[in-house]
């Protein structure tokens, strides 16, 4: 499957689509004054920031008071990505933290999304927004279908 057109201009900074914000619904319980469900606004964060958060979520493992290794805290990492990907509501907002009597955004998100399914939905959206739930085989198939559609002409198209 060799590509004959290896035009590098497709990869230039001005050609790559910009990351956009997306409205998502993660809770039916959070409503405005008119009773309408309020969407969260989310946006993917950079690869560099995700790597920084990953490093922050590596925790030491101790046995008998001695460090014997490290472990990666994946749930904490996903939550931290979620907090940084959530544009609205701002889980770092001082008034929000105060209203739930918590000091960290990690605690606040679990209070706001106190129903397990809401929190799970938010984590799922976090992963999708940041590209972690894209199935590679689906992407390959989509690319093949697009490529096939672009190369077909009315005379070569078969029904």
Image: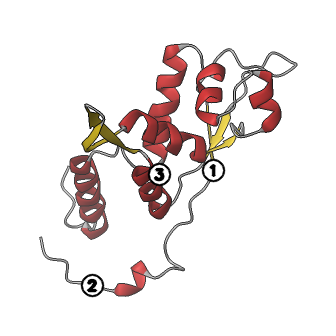
Do the numbered discs 3 and 2 sit on residues whose CB atoms are within 8 Å?
Answer: no
Residue extending furthest toward the left: 1
User: Alpha-carbon distance for marks 2 and 1?
Assistant: 31 Å
**In the image, 65: left or right of 112?**
left
Camera-near label (3 vs 2) is 3
Q: Which residue is mark 2?
A: 6
Residue at the image point whose x is 74% and y is 30% from the top: 97
Query: Relative to 3, is 82 above or below?
Result: above
Crowding near pointer 3: few (<14 within 10 Å), some, many (20+)? some
Do the numbered discs 2 and 1 sit on residues whose CB atoms are within 8 Å?
Answer: no
| Residue 41 screen position, x and y as percent | 66, 41
**Label 3's element?**
helix
Q: Which residue is mark 3?
A: 53
Label 3 vs 2, first from the N-terminus: 2
Residue at the image point whose x is 53% and y is 52% from the top: 44
| Residue 34 screen position, x and y as percent | 86, 18
Crowding near pointer 2: few (<14 within 10 Å), some, many (20+)? few
| Residue 117 screen position, x and y as percent | 49, 16
Residue 92: quarter of image? top right
Label 2 vs 1, first from the N-terminus: 2
């Amino acid at each position: 499957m060799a590509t004959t057109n290896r035009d590098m201009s497709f990869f230039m900074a001005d050609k790559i689509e910009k990351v956009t914000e997306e409205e998502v619904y993660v809770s039916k319980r959070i409503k405005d004054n008119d009773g309408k469900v309020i969407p969260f606004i989310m946006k993917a964060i950079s690869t560099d920031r995700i790597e920084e958060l990953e490093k922050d979520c590596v925790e030491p493992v101790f046995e008998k008071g001695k460090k014997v290794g490290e472990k990666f805290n994946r749930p904490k990492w996903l939550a931290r990505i979620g907090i940084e990907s959530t544009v609205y509501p701002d889980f770092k907002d001082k008034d929000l933290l105060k209203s739930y009597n918590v000091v960290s955004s990690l605690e606040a998100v679990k209070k706001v999304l106190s129903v397990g399914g809401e929190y799970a939905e938010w984590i799922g959206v976090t992963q999708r927004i940041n590209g972690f739930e894209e199935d590679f085989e689906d992407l390959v198939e989509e690319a093949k279908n697009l490529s096939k559609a672009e190369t077909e002409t009315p005379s070569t198209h078969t029904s």
